[in-house]
Structures are given as structure tokens and as C-alpha cells.
Image (cartoon, rainbow, N blue to C red):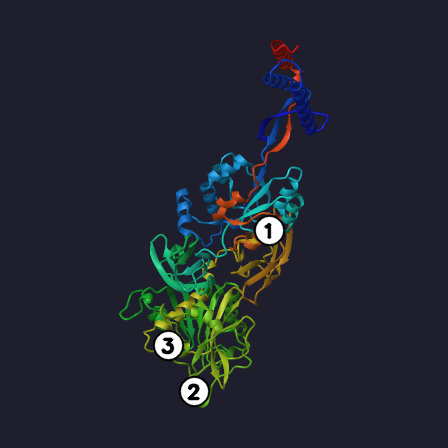
Amino acid sequence: MLETVQQRELGYSLPVHWAWVLVAGLAMTWLVFHVYLRERGPGSKKTRWLLSLLRSLTCLLVLLASMNWHVVNKRFRKPELMLIFDQSQSLQHLDGLEDSPGILENLARRKWDRPNRLNILKAELLERSALLEQLGKQFRLTAYGVGETVRPLPFSQPSGLVDQLEAEAGQSRIDQLTSRLIRQSAGNPPEAILLFSDGLDSGNPKFQSSIRAAQAIGVPIHPVGLGSMTPARDLLIENVQANPKVFIEDLVEFRVAVAASGFAGKTARIEIVDVEAGEKLLEQEIKLTSDQYRNLVRCRLRMKRAGKRKLRIRAARLEGEFDTGNNQQEFTVEVMGDPIKVLLAASYPSREFHYLKQFLGRESRPRPGEPVEFARNRIELHTHLQQADIEYANVDRHAIQLFPVTKKQLFEYDVILFCDLKPNWAGDVAGGLGQNELAHLQTFVEDHGGGLAVIAGPRFTPSAYSRSSLAELLPIGLDKLTSPAGENLEQAFPIRRTGPGRAFLPMEIGTDDDEIQYSGFPGPFWFASSSELKASARVLAELDHNGRPLPAIVVHNVGNGSVLYHAFPATWRWRYRTNELYFGRYWSQMIQYLASRKLTRGEKGILLETDRKQYFRDEPVMLIARLSDRSTVADQDLRVKIENRSGFQRILPIRSVSQNQGSFSAELNQLSPGEYEAFLTNDPEVSTRFSISGSSRENIRQPLNEVGLQNLARKSGGTYCRIHQFAKVQDSLPGNRLIEIGGEPPWVFWQQWELATLFGSLILFLLTAEWWVRKRSSML
């Protein structure tokens, strides 16, 4: 309801200008005095002055009566002052504070912990509530919230207005919506507009539409800037990634996305805590190299207890940090303590076979001088030695008489360590591996998802298998094998890690305090390698031969499983003066990597996900499919359907990232804002959800757009101030000017008989008084 002010005004109406009435009155008065003072008769001069005064008053009363006096009841309204409040998500950002103690004290009184732009605005409005009340007496206040749409904000008290302020809009359309409000008020424009905003407009940060609309109707805009140009000092954990299922004693890598602002040169501390046990598992320091730091920190941790572990990854609070609510995230890891079944098979008892058998077959009990992590053996070992007597299996608890001849027997194992085994076509001695066993081994890897480690040997492996199915499993080609001969057998060939090897987690065998350089280990005297690599092969370590590098340790995925190739049978030499620490750790981690299919066996063979769950306008969406069991989904069937609630649908294929890696991806562009679901066309249960905001990355902190707001004020005729200068805003506003909006019919004096009688009686009284004075003075 429009608040009005009523005022009564006395008025008159004349056919001529009031100046002529004044001239006529003065002329009449002069004439009366001129005639009466010169009149003949016995009257004294004093009497003549009195008579002149009485007649002049009579004439003036008659003249005033002819002016048609009336009283008008007029209605007025206060001039409108429009308050426009930015309600976009950018008001949730933290900034550097000019008056930190004062602002924080003000927020503390309101029990608001976060000194973001919105809370500072609310606190300042409540602190200046007297100013708002004064403006309410001077103007008619109307308030609107603008973000993605315009929202009226009705209020009667400042606290009622503050309660309605929010910062939830995903898109800032301040310029467009402000110009719309100005155009809608063109017939009854406000006196001025107060715009409370950080100036971050998704469409036009120069406010050109608002400037044109304000200039068209002459309305000044007074922007009040929220935020600052400098970022708040903040440290946050943006995201955490790790394998959700691991083996006990596995080395797990947590990829922690850390961002920090305002802490250049400081040191942050990242901690991983077991939530249930309350135990700190890891503490790692990182150097914050810039004021806008963003990096992926890799934290590596051995999981020493089985079960579902709820972990909290947190960054310790730094001095001067306002917001600690974003300093942590939780991640659940399922640690499996099931034993890994390993078959170690060789033709003859080489040193590699002997020391692998000794380490992998050890009892689960602590032994003097042995690393603590080896106190519990998680490997259930069987061994097969082709040259052993048949009675050997009866006296060795690990030995079996024959290499598994059926798929069922072979599939009981998780990992096969294939040393220098003899095939049945090599020589006349029976007992070698036949084509059936090798075909089963291929099925074991490709379909069952088993792990295979092939360790080269000088007698048979891999050269004797160049025309067998084993050659199809190996990551190297066997047509051009290279091996040292003659005097070269007296020379050791040191190995070194490659770039992919440094990124391959099972190759990390150092302690928390040192990084192991494989070049420091005793190198092999013999090897069998080839520069011919399969497309999916990753060379983890290499050696030099005649001036050119050759693969020494190579891994790749084949179907559902993984194959590791060792070009040398001499890792046992790594035990020298290390008490099996690095030798044992290397093979433990490699075996757990090769057995990783065991972690997901029995689950769906494919996982569909996106690289993030929340995207912003114009950002690409990366769809990722990870196959743990390629037998469940054929490559040609990897087609994904994307749909949303509004009826949008799209089907697209997702392409393999690299051959036989079991990882596929596709990129989506130009999706409209909304909630989406993506699922496999042939298996809708394999799905993922993501959303796209209409915002142009409103959640990324941007500084106050002070230049844009100052330009808006200057070109519209207003003034710009910051929120902490809000008390001065009254000086910039127009003065108090009521606007007439109508009134009631005039109340005319002479239409009222009472006033007409009174006025006539007064004239008659003056005439009678003049007659009486003349009679007393004998002037009649």
C-alpha cells in the first residue's frame, strides 16, 4: 500500500495576476487617505487618520472577498529510493579485510563465523540500521534481490530486510536485471538507486545496459561495493582421490587437490587421520609458492589394518585463516586382509627362484632383524620346480608336483610367477609346459583377470616361446631379442627408473625419508630384452646396452589382467646389505598390483564416472569408463546415453584411452544447465550423475569489480562507495522532495454561509464605526 502525506494549503483564484490586485489595493488606499485627509470639516487630524484607516480596511476587505479564497487538501508521496541487492554465489567468497578487528567483532556479535561478502553486508546494514530508518523517513524504500531473476524483498524494519538476503544464485545477471527494473519504473522513476554488489556480472561487467537505462530517465545509480581486490587468506582441500579398495600393507597414494590464497612462502601441513581410531597416519608438509596456489599433492601411506577405514584428510589451520570449514574431506578405503594365492614356477632352482621362495613362503611371525612390515605374510605360496624329484612335493609344504593342467586348477591362483620354465618342445626331456597349459595361462590373464610376472632366464624364457600364446601376453616383441654374450657376462648392467616408472606406485620401495634410486642396486649380468614394444606397454625401468636403452621392467594390461615382464633374473642381488627390505617390498607391491583384479572380482565389470560432479557453464564434461572385467562389456558396446529432466538425450561412443588398458573416455561440450544422468545403453545400472550450473564459475573467487562499479556511478550521475563507507551514502542522495499525487475538491470560503455572514458583518461593522466617528466629530 502506497504511503501518502496529506497537507492543507490556503489558496485563491483571480482572473488577473495577483500583482494587479496588490497595485489596485495600494492605489485604493492612497486615494482614500488622499481624499479623507483633505476633506473639509471640523474634525481633527487624528480623526481624519482614523476615518481613512476604517475606509481603507473596508475597501481591502471588499477586495479580498473578490479573490475567491479556498482551502485545498493535497496528497503527496515520498520520493522512491530503490535498493538492489546482488544475490549471486560470488557473495559467499572471502576477501582480505581492511578493518579486520572491527569487522570480525561486528560479525561475532551476530554469531556469524564466516567473514564472507554476504555476512559483511548483513552486519553493516544492521550496524547502520538508524541510517536505514532515517532513509525510510525521507524516502519510500523498495528493495529487490537480483541474481538469475528479480525477487522483491518486502520489509518494514532493517532486520526484516537482512533476513531475506542470500547468496544462492548460480549466475549474476546484475546489469540485465537492473536495467529491466529501471525501464519498468520509467513512468514513475525513483529518485535514486542504491546497488549493493561485488560487480561480478556473468554477462556484462561494464554495466552498459544499466547505464543507458539510467541515462534515459535521469536516475542516478549509487553502487556500494562488496568485497575487496585482495583475496582472503584461505587454505582448502578441494578434492581427494585414491583407490577405494586395497590390500593390507599396500602403499596407497592419496591425490589431494590443495588450493591456498594469501599464503605465499608459508608451509602447510597435510594430515591423514583414522577417524574411528583417532590415529594420525601421515603428516606431510608442502610449500605454498604463490598467493594463488593450486596443486595436486601426492600423499603415500601404507594401510596396516584391515577393514573399512574412514580417513579424514585435512590441512592444519594457518595463522590468519578465517575459514577452516573447507580444510578437510573424508575418504573411505576398504582394506582387504585376504591372502593372495601365488604360484612360483621354474625349471631349475635358480637364485631368483630360491630367494623368491624363501621370502614369499616365510611364516607370519616377527623375526630378529627383519623389517616390521614383513612380520605378517599375506601370500599363500605354492611352488613348482620342473627338475625336482616327484617326492619333493611331499617334503616341502609349498611344492606341488605338476604345473596346473586345467583351468580350474590354474584359476585357484591370483598371480603366477613364471620363471625360466621349459616348454615340452625344447629338447627330449618330458615334463615341459604344453600348448594347453599356455592356452589356459592366456585365459587366466585375459578373461579371469589374473596377474602374470614373466622373469627371463638364459635357457628358455622368453626365446623358446616366440611362437606360443605366451608371446601374445608379453609386453615386448620376441622377434628381435637382445642378450649379452661372451665377455659381456662379466659386466653388470645397472638399471634406472623411467618417467612412467617414477609415476608407477608399486615401484616406490623407499621409506618415508628416502627415495630409492634403482641405479644404486647391483645390476644384472644377463638380460633378454627387445626394443619392440606392444602399444599398451609401459617401460618402468631400462638398462643401457651398446649405447642404447633397452626395457628392463615392462608392464601392460591384457584383457582383464596384467602382465609384468622382467628382462633379467637378478632382483635377488637387491638384497645385498638391505636385509631383504627393498627386494621384499618390491615383490610384495608388484604381486599386490598383479592381484588387484581380486579386489573387484564379483563386482560389475565396468565403472562409469565423471572427473567432477559439478560443472559450470561452457566447461567440458569428461566421462570416464573403467573396465575391471572386459568379459562383461565388449568394446563395441561402450556407448553412453546422456539425458536430463527436460527431455534432452544424446548417445555417444566412448573411446579407449590406450589399447588394452581398460580405460575409456569421452568429452561432452555445450551442455545447457541442469541435472544429468549418464548410463551405458546396454546396462542402465552402470550410471553416474552430474550437474551443470548456469553460472560462469561463480564459485571461483574473483576480486571486486571496482572499475565497473565506478564507471556505472560516473556515467549515471551517482557516486561510488565501499560497504564500510555506507554511512556517507546519505550525503550523496537527493534532498527531501515530496511528490504531489492528487487531492480533494477545494473548500471555498464564500460557499459557506457562516463565513459569508461573518465577512459581511465585519464590513458592516467598519462602515458603522466610520459613521459613528463622523457623527461624533460633526463631519456629517
User: Circle 1 sits on which residue?
Assistant: 714
Give left or right: position of 616 versus 277. right
Measuring from the top left, give residue 440's x and y in whole percent: 51, 68
Position of 375 relative to 770 (above/below):
below
Q: Secondary structure at mark 1?
A: helix
Front residue of 262/315: it is 262
Label 3 or label 2, whichever lies nearer to me, is 3
The residue positioned 33% from the left and 54% from the top of the image is 278
Location of residue 762 (image quadrant) = top right
Disc on the earlier residue, 2 or 1 = 2
The residue positioned 48% from the left and 84% from the top of the image is 545
For label 1, count other residues whose C-alpha is less than 10 Å away and answer few (under 14), some (14-19) or many (20+): some
Front residue of 286/684: it is 286
Which residue appears farthest toward the right when viewing the image?
A: 15
Q: Secondary structure at mark 3?
A: helix
Disc on the earlier residue, 3 or 2 = 2
Locate the N terminus by quadrant: top right
Do tag 2 and tag 1 residues touch (Cβ < 8 Å)? no
Which residue appears farthest toward the left when viewing the image?
A: 368
User: Circle 3 sits on which residue?
Assistant: 574
Front residue of 153/595: it is 153
The residue positioned 44% from the left and 88% from the top of the image is 488
Q: CA distance from mark 2 to mark 1?
A: 85 Å
Q: Which mark is residue 404?
A: none
Position of 691 relative to 61 (above/below):
below
Measuring from the top left, give residue 676's x and y in whole percent: 58, 50
* Numbered label tally: 3
Q: CA distance from mark 3 to mark 2?
A: 18 Å
For the question of whether residue 486 can be seen, the reply is yes
Name the amino acid type tagged 3: Trp
User: Circle 2 sits on which residue?
Assistant: 489
Measuring from the top left, give residue 234's x and y in whole percent: 44, 56
